[in-house]
Image (cartoon, helix red, strand yellow):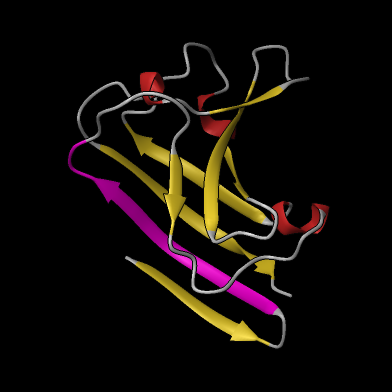
Amino acid sequence: NMYYTKIGRVVHISGSLAFNSISGSGIMAIGGLPYTSINGNDAYTHLAAHAYDSLNVGNNTYQFQTLRVDQNSTTIRIIIPAGNGDIRTFAHYSHVASSTFRFRVAGYYITS
């Protein structure tokens, strides 16, 4: 269940995402945002998420994942900090600990 409100060039989004089955390989991406983001760094600095079921990144940074809206895109990617807190990596299918995965999303992104 995801909701959005667009005011001017700002799209506010919130809700929760749940997957009953996940398979494949590579980076996890969520497509289908209602508007295309701007082509600049501010496209992916304003979303936050909290996974609450089945995300296993293998260290204590589980609770610090965030989301990035790709530049000039309608796609979101899940980002997880490394164990040292310095490097962020994209979540991969291998980080999902079971067939289900849920997280909450809140924030906004800028459209062109």
- Which quarter of the rendered picture does the N terminus lie within? bottom left
Q: How many marks?
A: 0
Answer with left or right where residue 112 lies relative to residue 7.
right
Residue 83, compared with residue 16, is above or below; it is above
Q: Main SS of the magenta segment? A: strand
Q: Quadrant of residue 111?
A: bottom right
Answer with left or right where residue 106 lies relative to residue 8.
left
Residue 47, compared with residue 90, is above or below; it is below
The residue drawn where x is 29% and y is 27% is: 24
Answer with left or right where residue 74 lies relative to residue 40.
left
The residue drawn where x is 48% and y is 30% is: 27
Q: For this rendering, which residue is in front, 76 or 52?
A: 76
Q: Quadrant of residue 90?
A: top right
Q: Position of residue 55 (x, y in %)?
A: 38, 28
Q: Position of residue 86 (x, y in %)?
A: 78, 20
Find the residue positioned furthest to the bottom.
8
Q: Position of residue 16 (x, y in %)?
A: 37, 57
Q: Position of residue 112 (x, y in %)?
A: 74, 75
Q: For this rendering, which residue is in front, 69 or 73?
A: 73
The answer to if 1 sits in the magenta stretch is no
Q: Quadrant of residue 83?
A: top right
Which range of residues does the magenta coloring cover? 10-21
